[in-house]
């Protein structure tokens, strides 16, 4: 598989605080890659830097062969890289449909209606309640909306930050199985999760982040069965 995304020796700081301390990883075309780690490990900072919301202090980010670490965020979206942020960040007063259409703001092609339908096919509840204010949605429904909105830019690479946060086990299963569906439909996925088990089950490759550094890497299966991951992240003895 060719690499769609290559992050090399990446460092990111907030003032004097180094949040990401020289990490390298790749995401191959068609893969699901999971970044796992506890609170404050630097997962969100990494995603925000890839999508152009933060600038690295060192290192490089290459997407489809092109350096993007100095590229403005809105241009990165047009290159085919979308970000569904932590906390979902939907607009509560706007309708479901209006929220979805925001995801297509960089597009001027004639296929936006078709992709709106694709989002409704993926998550039927979005179609059933398309005219309802998004703020009336439950956490799980808002997560579906955030994912649907990110898909509206027609990304080749979709980055998801903690999609399972605050969801019931049933809703979490639903979201995880949709990630699998998106992969089967051809989208490459970079998934950030505190729920290590769910994220590694789906992952072709995984990386474990601890205080800004990658401490372990392997296939999803290798990490799921590794003693270190089981003890530290899966709560097993
Ligand atoms: P979580 O799952 O809790 O979101 P995370 O792995 O995503 O954790 P980050 O949010 O990337 O971790 O945070 C990494 C480090 O950077 C933490 O020590 C955090 O306190 C710090 N940090 C994050 N955002 C800021 C900010 N805006 N200003 C200063 N420090 C920050």
Image (spheres, helix red, strand yellow):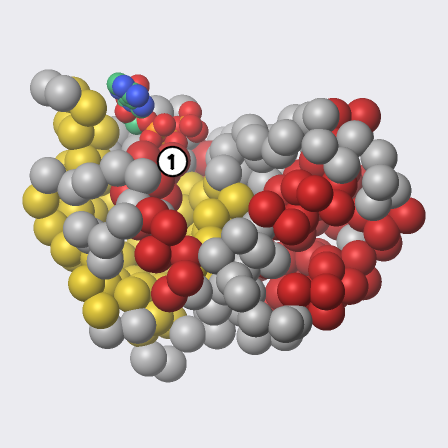
Q: Residue 213 in the image: state x and y as whole percent.
A: 22, 39
Please, which residue is most extreme toward the bottom here? Answer: 1
- Regarding residue 34, the answer to whether it shows in the image is yes
SS type, badge 1: helix
Residue 70 vs residue 184, the one in the foreground: 70
Question: Going 22% across and 69% down the picture, which residue do you hit?
Answer: 66
Residue 92 lies left or right of residue 200; in this view the side is right
Question: Going 75% across and 46% down the picture, which residue do you hit?
Answer: 97
Considering the image in quadrants, where does the N terminus appear?
bottom left
Q: Is residue 2 above or below residue 214?
A: below
Residue 195 vs residue 94, the one in the foreground: 94
Q: Residue 107 in the image: state x and y as whole percent.
A: 52, 62
Residue 72 vs residue 166, the one in the foreground: 72
Q: Residue 56 in the image: state x and y as whole percent.
A: 16, 41
User: Ligand 1 within 8 A of label 1's CB?
Assistant: yes
Give the total number of marks visible in the rendering: 1
User: Mark 1: few, some, or many residues within 10 Å (few <14, many ≥20)?
Assistant: many
Residue 224 lies left or right of residue 39; in this view the side is right
Residue bearing the label numbered 1: 44
Residue 228 vs residue 92, the one in the foreground: 92
- Regarding residue 208, the answer to whether it shows in the image is no
Residue 146 lies left or right of residue 60; in this view the side is right
Q: Residue 83 in the image: state x and y as whole percent.
A: 47, 48
Residue 93 lies left or right of residue 41; in this view the side is right
Quadrant of the rendered image holding ligand 1: top left
Corner quadrant of residue 232? top left
Question: Going 48% across and 57% down the picture, which residue do you hit?
Answer: 106
Question: Going 34% across and 70% down the picture, which residue do you hit?
Answer: 4
Please, which residue is most extreme toward the top here? Answer: 16
């Amino acid at each position: 598989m060719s690499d769609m995304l290559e992050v090399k020796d990446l460092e990111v700081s907030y003032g004097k605080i180094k949040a990401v301390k020289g990490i390298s990883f790749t995401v191959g075309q068609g893969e699901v890659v999971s970044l796992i780690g506890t609170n404050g490990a630097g997962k969100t900072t990494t995603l925000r830097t890839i999508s152009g919301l933060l600038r690295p202090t060192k290192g490089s980010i290459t997407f489809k062969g092109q350096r993007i670490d100095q590229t403005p965020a809105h241009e990165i979206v047009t290159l085919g890289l979308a970000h569904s942020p932590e906390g979902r960040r939907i607009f509560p007063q706007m309708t479901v449909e209006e929220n979805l259409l925001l995801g297509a703001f960089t597009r001027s092609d004639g296929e936006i209606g078709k992709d709106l339908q694709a989002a409704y096919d993926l998550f039927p509840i979005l179609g059933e309640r398309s005219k309802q204010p998004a703020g009336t949605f439950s956490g799980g429904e808002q997560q579906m909306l955030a994912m649907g909105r990110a898909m509206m830019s027609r990304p080749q690479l979709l980055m998801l930050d903690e999609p399972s946060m605050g969801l019931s086990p049933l809703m979490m299963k639903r979201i995880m199985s949709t990630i699998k569906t998106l992969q089967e439909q051809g989208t490459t996925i970079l998934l950030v999760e505190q729920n290590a088990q769910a994220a590694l089950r789906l992952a072709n490759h995984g990386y474990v982040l601890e205080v800004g550094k990658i401490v372990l890497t392997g296939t999803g299966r290798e990490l799921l069965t590794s003693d270190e991951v089981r003890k530290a992240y899966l709560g097993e003895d």
